[in-house]
Image (cartoon, coloured by chain):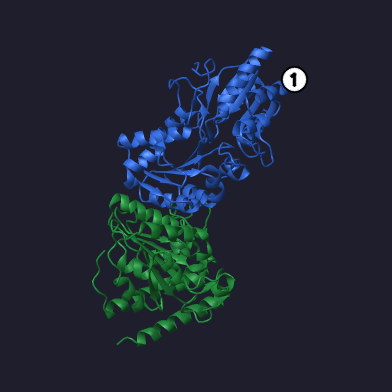
Chain colours: A green, B blue
Amino acid sequence: MKVKPYDMATVHELEEAAYNVRKTLLTLVYNIGMGHLGGELSMVEVATAWYYRYLNFDVKDPHKEGRDRFVLSKGHCSETLYSIFSCLGAYDLDYMINNFECLEGSKFGMHTNRKYCPQIEVSAGSLGHGLPIAVGMALAGRKQKAANRVVVLTGDGELDEGSNWEAINTAGHYQLGNLVLCVDKNDLQMTGTTADVMNINPLDKRLEAFGWDVRWIDDGNDMEQVLKTLDALPEADSQIRRKPIAIIAHTVKGKDVDFMEGEVKWHGGGIAEDKFNQAIASIEKNWEERKSKWQ
Amino acid sequence: MAVKTTFDFDQMLSNAREAFGEELYNMAKDGLDFVFTYSDNVAPSSSAGKVIKEFPERCFNFGIAEPGQVGASCGMALAGEVVYAQVMGPFLSLRSADQIHTDIAYNDVNVRLIGTHAGVTAGGGPTHNCIADLALYHAIPNLTVVVPADARQCQRAVRASHSFQGPMVIRIDRAGMPAVYADDDYEFEFGKAIETKPGSDVTLIATGSPTYWALMGAKKLEEEYGISVRVVDMHTIKPIDKDMIVKAAKETGNIITVEEHSINGGLGSQVAEVLLEAGCGNVGFKRVGLPDEFAVLGETDAIYHYYGMDPEGIAKTTAQVLGLAK
C-alpha cells in the first residue's frame, strides 16, 4: 500500500503508539502471569510501525480480502501483537486478561492461535515455522496475481532452526517480490547471546549469499529509523522476480524497561508487582525523555 | 451388497503414484483450482509431471527440503488455496513431523499431503522405509488419514479430497499396487470402511495394498480349510471406522490386521485399541505387518514374503490364530 512519506509528526504519533503498546503489554503480562517480555519489548517499534502505518489490515475486519499478511514467527511474543490489537481498538485489557488461557473458550494464549484470535494470521510457537509459511503465502500470491505483501517477523535466536534456511533458500530461488522478512535482532536468545549460544553472524552476508536484498535498521527501537526503512521499501509485487527483502532490525531485548534491557534472565516468565511498578515507571521515564527531544 | 473385486480375476497391477498424478491432471483439466507442491522426486515424465508442464503457474518445486515444503504448503492454504503436496513418505512423516502437527493440523488448513513409497516399496533399505508414519499421524489431532486400497480408489480419494474441509494425508505405494476392485461400483466415503468380501469365521482388516494380499489370503484359506473369511478395507485409518471393527469382531470372532507399516502404532494397534475399549477383548487377534526391527534388505515382495505379509503368510498366521494350522 502506498503511504505518504513520513514526517516528524508521524514519527511522534507512532512513538506514542509504541509507548502505549509497551504499557499495555506490561500490564497484560503482569495480570496473566506469563510472557516473554524481553523479545516482546524489543520488537515493539517494528511491529507497531507495520500495523499502524504500512499493513493493509483492519483490526476490526481481520479476514478482509486482499489484506497484507503479517506472520509472527516468534509465536511466544504473542502479547505484543495482542497489545497492538488492543491499542488499535479490537479488545480492552480486561477482556484479554479474562480470556487468556482460561481453558474452553480461550481467546488468547502464550503462543498465537489464529482460530482463537482472528487478527492472528498463523498459529505458531514452535520456532522456524513462520518463514516457510510466509514463503508459501508469497508463492500463492504469485499464482493469484495478488497485490498484497507478506511480512514475517522472526527472532534472531530462532534463525538457528534449519527450516528457516530452507525457506530463505526457497525465497531466493523464486525471487519473491512480495515478501519481507524482518529479523528482530536483539542478539540474545534464551540462555545467552546468540554469538555464544549459536552464532548467526554475519547475518547480512549469510542472507545475501542466499540471494536476498538485505537492509539494516541500526536502531530498531528508533521509530524514525524504522519508518525510514519501511518507507523506502518498493511496492509489493507478486509477479516481478527480484531479490526478496530482509530487514535486520538491531534492537534491545527488554527495551525501555531499564532493568530488563540486555538481560538474558528476562527472556520469559511473569513479573511480580514491585517489578511491574518499576517497569511502568521506567517506560514512562523513557517516554518523557523521548518526548523532551521532540522539537 | 457384494462388492465386485478382483478376487476371481488375475491380479491387475496398476500404479497408485501414477494414478494420483493422472487424477491431479484430470482435475486441472476439469477446471478445479489447486496448487501442487512437490519434492525433487517427481519425474517430469510421470503423470504429475504433466501437471507441472501444462499448469506451471500452480506448481512449485521445493527440491529436497520437506519441512520447508510442508510449511509453505500451509502458507498457500492460508492464502486460500487447496494444496496437494507430494512428498516421499518416510521423509514427509519423519522430517516434517512438526510441520504436519503445527502448520497443517493445528492451523487446520486444506493441505493434502501425498505420502508416497509406503512401507518398503521404495526399496533401498530402512532409510527409505516408511514404517512409522501412521503411528505419528495416529496421535496428531485434526488429521484425516487415507490409505487407498488400489490405484483407482486412490483417484477417487484424490478427487473427493478437493472439496474436503481440513487437513488430510493420502498414503500410497511407490508403484505396482494390485487392483482390489473390479470397477467403481461401490460406495467410497472417507471414514467408512468397506466390507470388500463377506465372511463369517474371521475378518482380515487391511489398509492400502495389503487389502489385495488379504483378499488373496482369504482365497487361500477358503480353499485350504473351507472356512469363510471376511475382508475389510480400512481405507481411512483416521478417523477409524470403529463400528465396522466391532461388527466384525462380534460376527466373526477373530480379527487379523494387515498393513505395510510397523505393527506398532499403525492399523493393528488402533484396531486393538478399538476392540478392547468396545469390550471385544476376547476375539482371536493378530497383527500382520513389519516387526519391531529395521527390515532386512531385499526386493519389496521378498521382504513382505519374509515377514509373512504376503497372501501365503497372512493365510498361515490366520490359520494359526484359528487353530487350523497343520
Residue drawn 47% across and 44% down?
B41
Q: Residues within 10 Å of mark 1 (few under 14, many from 20)?
A: few
What is the quadrant of the C terminus of chain B in the image?
top right
As shown in the figure, which amino acid type bears the numbered disc 1?
A: Gly
Residue closer to the observer: A178 or B239: A178
Q: Position of residue A117 (x, y in %)?
A: 42, 56
Q: Position of residue B285 (x, y in %)?
A: 69, 27
Q: Tell me which corner region of the image, top left, top right, bottom left or bottom right, holds residue B310.
A: top right
Q: Position of residue B118 (x, y in %)?
A: 55, 37
Residue drawn 70% across and 25% down?
B317
What chain letter is assigned to the residue under label 1?
A: B
Up/down of A225 relative to B253, above or below: below
Residue closer to the observer: A37 or B17: B17
Does any portion of residue A168 appear in the rendered image?
yes
SS under mark 1: loop
Residue closer to the observer: A191 or A86: A191
Residue drawn 67% across and 32% down?
B276
Residue drawn 49% across and 69% down?
A156
Q: Tell me which corner region of the image, top left, top right, bottom left or bottom right, holds residue B296.
A: top right
Up/down of B17 relative to B93, above or below: above
Up/down of B223 relative to A174, above or below: above
Horizontal arrangement in the rendering, residue B185 relative to residue A189 (left or right)? left
Up/down of B249 relative to A194, above or below: above
Does any portion of residue A120 appear in the rendered image?
no
Q: Tell me which corner region of the image, top left, top right, bottom left or bottom right, holds residue A43.
A: bottom left
- Residue picked out by circle 1: B323
Q: Position of residue B266 (x, y in %)?
A: 61, 37
